[in-house]
Amino acid sequence: MNTPTLDATTTTAPPAGVPVVDIDPFSDAFLTDPYEAHQRMREAGPVVWIPAYGIYACARHASVHAVFNDHATYISGAGVGLANFHKEAPFRPKSLILEADPPSHTKARAVLARILSPKTVMQIRATFTAEAGTLIDRLQARQATGETIDAVKDLAEVYPLKVFPDAVGVGEAQRENLLLYGDMIFNSFGPRNERLQKSAELVQPVTAWIMAHCQRENLRPGGFGDLIYQAADAGEITHEEAPLLVRSFLSAGVDTTVNGIGNAILCLARHPDQYAQLHADHALARPAFEEALRFESSVQTFFRTTSQDTELFGVPIPKDSKIVTFLAAANRDERQWPEPDRFNIQRRPAGHMAFGSGIHGCVGQVVARLEGEVVLTALAKRFSRIELVGEPQRRLNNTLRALASMPVRLIPA
Ligand code: OVM
């Protein structure tokens, strides 16, 4: 099997019995518009082979679901990116939850799941709602003075960077570091291409800040971060494990929701008929956010590694193979969804893969959904339309469907 190279120039002979799809899922062209290639992979079969990286791939809903729900065969401990940690050292100490398997995963997961529980969401809901209202009122006032609002820079990035670090208990200073860190982490799940190298250079000075904010003395007592240390005090995890679990909040909690919110606003701007329905009925905010997650999934891919020789939908897969699952392709599988390429906020797409599935399904999803819901509600209450006044710019990332900017005009109701 290949080790990741700078470019996808090496190829591995395809194993017998697997359809080959000759794409580079980490190229600029693919990342700019992945949907046609997703279709090609789904058509080719439930499991395909990508020669450029010597990996198996799943793009259908059924096969992505099958992989995520057999965590004993498709493990996370050898990394959930292209790199196989059985063959090369992880670039940072492994995440205790993301890059772990039972039984150690179970313990870490229980701690984070309790901190990010529906009960927690009840406690933070009022604050998250108020912050969305305040931010969007401020944007409306700025727009009234003639300023053009950027729905990414001024809203989708600002809102999660306010409410989530507040909840974790991270101070106000230099929070933008979390965006640089997230960009690098999500690039690191792909190959060691130029994209990763660039974001790794940018993140150098930021890493010390991130690690410092994993320490108890820099976390507000009672915040999500401090609650991890309280779990260590209670003996559920060790005090050595606590900072690494805080690191998971700081790695996974910002860039994901920034782009979830950004993508949702873009979907609504591009589908004014759908936005009109949301404006008429604010209770559609939650289903609209859910449909946006299906339609433009912020996390596009995750990998697993086989723990043994196995077979998936009739395709034999040897032990220690890497498999990439295209969550975003599963979310537009016509075998699963009627008219999958239609953005329809009435759809209520239960079973979408944007948060994954199985024991590693997003542990922060109740907080992510809260953020999406309150931002879309605040927009729907104030504006009758969201108009794009310039071409939205993408920020290409090896894993995330991300936006750099989106100039908009928010039309007051
Ligand atoms: C972690 C981590 C990092 C990135 C993503 C993620 C989506 C988790 O460090 O645990 O989950």
Image (tube, rainbow, N blue to C red):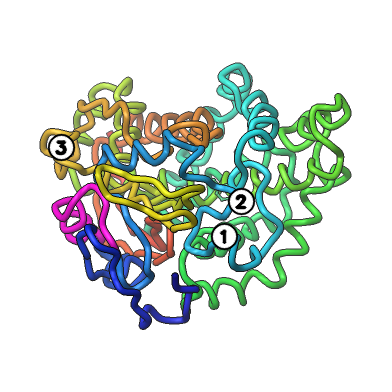
Residue at image position (77%, 48%) is 214
Q: Earlier in the sequence, mark 1 or mark 3?
A: 1
Asked if labels 1 and 2 touch by Cβ distance under 8 angstroms, the answer is yes
Magenta span main SS: helix
Residue bounds of the magenta highlight: 34-49
Specify whether 206 is left or right of 258.
Answer: right
Q: Residues within 10 Å of mark 2 (few under 14, many from 20)?
A: many
Q: Earlier in the sequence, mark 2 or mark 3?
A: 2
**Mark in front: 2 vs 3:** 3
Q: Is residue 35 rendered magenta in the image?
A: yes
Q: Does dot 1 land on a helix, a strand or a loop?
A: helix
Displayed quadrant of residue 313: top left
Q: Does dot 3 land on a helix, a strand or a loop?
A: loop
**Residue 185 — which label?**
1
Residue 122 lies, in percent from the top left, at 58, 17
Instruction: Name the amino acid, label 1.
Output: Ile
Residue 394 in sight here: yes
Would the CB of label 2 be found within 8 Å of ligand 1? yes
Would the CB of label 1 be found within 8 Å of ligand 1? yes
